[in-house]
Amino acid sequence: MNHIDTETLDLYLDGQLDPEEQAHIEAHLTECPTCQQELATLEDLFVAFDELSQADLPVDLTEAVLTQIALPVTTWHLRFVWGLLFVQLTLSIALAIWSGPVLTQDLSTQLIRLTSEWLFNLSINLMDWLSAQFVELNIFAVELPQILSAFDIDLFVSPLQWTLAIAGAGMIWLVGNRFLLANLNHTHDPQQEATS
């Protein structure tokens, strides 16, 4: 069973609920002992508050509060604040318009300078690396005949031999792919099983 919350019970005690809600709460209270107990506790609390004597304040604030309320609202504060805000906004826009071309020009020149430096350094590093690779390649090309002569390998290969070697490698590649692709087609395919 859902219980009535304390706020709703407060509104019920104050008589601030509409008649439909009040009838619903009264019907619930006839059936729910927990909510009856909560309502009795709240009623006791209200009675205790009513029995308290009012403390006398050492200073009567009524006159001071009423005087402040009766004072006319001064608009010069608002005008000053809005005027200051308008001046700040105007100066900010003027500064942005005045410094915009200078900032964008300076930014674009710095960006071009940084990009140029980066590309220059990259090209220098790339050239250094390529020259080192060419040196290594030249050393290898010079030493290759000596290495191959140790194995008694004939250095001259005719174009026919190259053609046959490349054609043989291509045929092996094609046959290997044929078997590989044929094997892939015969693997488990759930769509083919569903249709058959």
Image (tube, grey):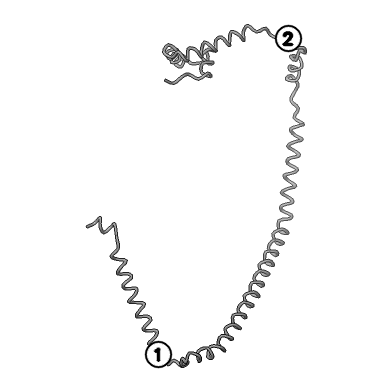
What amino acid does circle 1 point to?
A: Gln
* Residue furthest out toward the front: 150
Tell me the quarter of the picture where residue 133 sits. Answer: bottom right
Q: CA distance from mark 1 to mark 2?
A: 120 Å
Q: Quadrant of the N terminus?
A: top left
The image position of residue 138, as x and y in percent, is 58, 86
The image position of residue 60, as x and y in percent, is 76, 12
1 or 2: mark nearer the eye: 1
Q: Quadrant of the C terminus?
A: bottom left
Question: In the image, is residue 140 above or below residue 6?
Answer: below
Considering only order in the chain, which callout, 2 or 1, is on the residue closer to the N terminus?
Answer: 2
Name the secondary structure under disc 2: loop
Identify the mark at residue 161; answer none if there is no mark.
1
Residue pointed to by mark 2:
56
Residue visible at 72% across and 44% down in the picture: 89
Q: Dot 1, how many residues are within 10 Å of its Cα: few (below 14), some (14-19), or many (20+)?
A: few
Q: Dot 2, how many residues are within 10 Å of its Cα: few (below 14), some (14-19), or many (20+)?
A: few
Label tally: 2
Tell me the quarter of the picture where residue 43 sits. Answer: top right
Residue visible at 50% across and 89% down in the picture: 148
Residue visible at 58% across and 11% down in the picture: 45
Identify the mark at residue 43; answer none if there is no mark.
none
Name the secondary structure under disc 1: helix
Residue visible at 65% across and 8% down in the picture: 52
